[in-house]
Image (cartoon, helix red, strand yellow):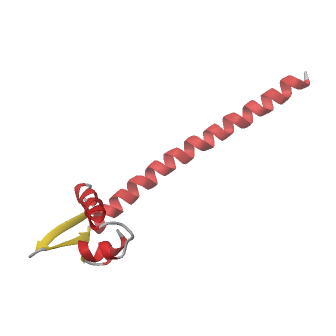
Amino acid sequence: MRRVLTGEQSVSALAAKYDMSFAAVQKHVAVLERAGLITKRRIGREALASGDVEAVRSVGAMLTEIEEVWRGRIARMDELFHTEEITDTSTEEN
């Protein structure tokens, strides 16, 4: 994603930088394209991929919202566990 967000890259150039097969890189690119995070166009035999910055920002914002929800839930669980520990300690003392 970082490489195609900074500028258009050929899929073959992307594949050359990773320790995986060309077919595996093509599959990754296809998944990102279906997700709307990148676009792909052809020039002759070469497939060029570029990142959609706005789509990535949108996903980032959504993930931030989800993270905030889960952090709140975890904080509430911590409070409940702490309350139970205090209750258990008080009960044991009596």
Q: Nearer the viewer, residue 34 or 12?
A: 12
How many numbered discs, if any? 0
* Residue at the extreme right of the image, as rendered: 93
* Residue at the extreme top of the image, as rendered: 94
The quarter of the rendered structure image containing the C terminus is: top right
Q: Is residue 48 above or below residue 69?
A: below
Q: Nearer the viewer, residue 78 or 35?
A: 35
Left or right, residue 89 beside residue 51: right
Q: Is residue 60 above or below residue 11?
A: above
Q: Is residue 83 above or below residue 49?
A: above
- Residue at point 45%, 48% (across, down): 66
Which percent across, then down, holds residue 90?
Answer: 85, 27
- Residue at point 67%, 34% (across, down): 80
Which percent across, then down, holds residue 23?
Answer: 26, 63
Quadrant of res 32: bottom left
- Residue at point 11%, 74% (across, down): 45
Which percent across, then down, holds residue 14?
Answer: 30, 74
